[in-house]
Amino acid sequence: MFEKILVANRGEIAVRIIRACKELRVSTVAVYSDADRSSLHVSMADEAFHIGPPAPGESYLVMEKIIDAAKRSRAEAIHPGYGFLSENAAFAGMCESEGIVFIGPTAQSIRLMGDKITARKIALKAKVPLVPGTDGAVTDVEAGGAAKKIGYPVMIKASAGGGGKGMRLVRKAKEFSAALGMARSEAHGAFGDDSVYIEKYIERPRHIEIQVIGDSHGKVLHLFERECSIQRRHQKVIEEAPSGFISAKTRKQMGEMALRLAKAVKYRGAGTVEFIMDQKENFYFLEMNTRVQVEHPVTEMVTGLDIVKWMIRTAAGQKLPFKQSDIKMNGHSIECRIYAEVPEQNFMPAPGRVEYIRAPSGPGIRNDSSVYSGFEVTPHYDPMISKLIVWAGDRTEAIDKMRAALDEYIVLGVKTNIGFLTRLFKEAEFGRAEIDTGYIERHPELLKAQLADLEPALAAAALGMRNATREVEEPAAQTRSNWKSFARRLAVSRSQAL
Ligand code: ADP
């Protein structure tokens, strides 16, 4: 096992990795930008190195700075987390040539899977089902004809794609060329590469992915599926394991396909093979993410395996000591991402100071976060406050637990999506697992802010007043409605005092 690991990330995932290291008795090194001086990952790590200004391009994304911090601290390995340098083959290669272990797959595996067109070719060779589409990138001249041949509706997708960028749905031929132009310019802006390919659009698709893990001795196992069909702007909001939809037969097939693909690139570490599924349970390979995913906790909850620890152990050369048939799923787990954002304004980020935060706790509740009372959610990074994860015996129970947990979640000072999530978990359709990636768009009523959503804002104002007047006790019970009445009481006592 390593003695010291550098964590090349920030936020909840940096905290998550540092916790795993502590449990493994490994020392940790944090890196931080100016905006993260008082971040939790910095105070939790044994050492911390300042790496520059807030902009990721000047700090977390600068490979030389990260390598330099690793060398100065004599860290033997780097965990990249997700985002930032996690899927950067050049960075993995740089670690390899500097004699630092990159906690993830080899630079070669990342290179092969990082480009969606190359990944499609590998999948084709490994006989993994693919969404019908073009064999490779298309020129402007070829594109229209290809779309017609595939048949509308089609998706235009960036070869270098990620995070839903450079992707366009086109329903009619006459809308095609405008959409092509937009997809190219978005891809160019986001990835510096404007090559695109075309795929058949799958109607009412579900997003189902398989977690895989490999060691450096040739063993690759899968940890079953996660369903991430509830998305906004092609980004996941709610994830669960197992899927509330697929049959045991489909589950088995998907696991086998994912392993076939992972073996084709001699995969090491944790990875995810993403599939898109139609309403008849036909599934097609979308892409492979060669890193730990945001939603890995739901798989941990149902399998009892600590994915981050296994990433570290396999990177250190340890063998996976179990076989496929040893891995079982138990119960049901759901994660939702709590964001500082305004759902009714197209999920616009709402950074600001979190005046007060109180996360729910109790049996089967896990909150992965790096936010504390007084923490500043900055506009420089993703405005995620936390990932709230529940585990229960079955899906219905897990939904009920999530509803109750959300009711206990108090975040004051910034706008959040908690009200929106609460409404979503109350919907009967969601309860019946009748979900697909267009669910949120089909339910505009979820986006309408309700009076209840204002509680935290009201209570934040009240909290500020309380600090000044010390007139009214903070509520002892921990639900959002308690906070609302607290705010009212305070407002009344204030007006009486005035
Ligand atoms: P990215 O790498 O940008 O996240 P993906 O290829 O993983 O892009 O696709 C992201 C999401 O976009 C999917 O989860 C799905 O909701 C939607 N999507 C992608 N391809 C298709 C398709 N061919 N048909 C329908 N929806 C699609």
Image (cartoon, grey):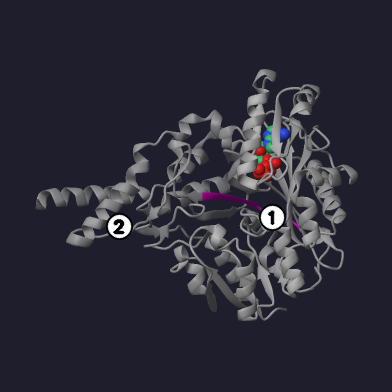
Quarter of the picture containing the N terminus is bottom right
Which is nearer the eye, 274 or 251? Answer: 274
Quick one: label 2, few (<14), some, or many (20+) residues within 10 Å?
few
Numbered tag placed on residue 386 in the rendering: none
* Circle 1: element type: loop
Residue 217: give x, y in percent of width and height.
86, 68
Residue 190: give x, y in percent of width and height.
61, 45
Up the image or down, 158 lies above or below 266; here it is: above
Up the image or down, 427 lies above or below 331; here it is: above
Q: Earlier in the sequence, mark 2 or mark 1?
A: 1
Q: Which residue is mark 2?
A: 475
Please tell me in which quadrant of the rendered image residue 102 appears. Answer: bottom right
Magenta residue span: 328-337
Up the image or down, 177 lies above or below 197; here it is: above
Cα separation between marks 2 and 1: 37 Å
* Circle 2: element type: loop
Indicate the amino acid at tag 2: Pro
Name the residue rendered at 62%, 32% in the picture: 182
Image quarter for ligand 1 equals top right
Residue 310 visible: no
Q: Which residue is mark 1?
A: 330
Q: How many marks?
A: 2
Tag nearer the camera, 2 or 1: 2
Residue 77 visible: yes
Residue 9: give x, y in percent of width and height.
58, 64
Q: Report the side of 187 relative to 58 (left or right).
A: right
Residue 279: give x, y in percent of width and height.
72, 31
Is 245 in the magenta?
no
The majority secondary structure of the magenta stretch comes to strand
Q: Report the side of 417 relative to 461 (left or right).
A: right
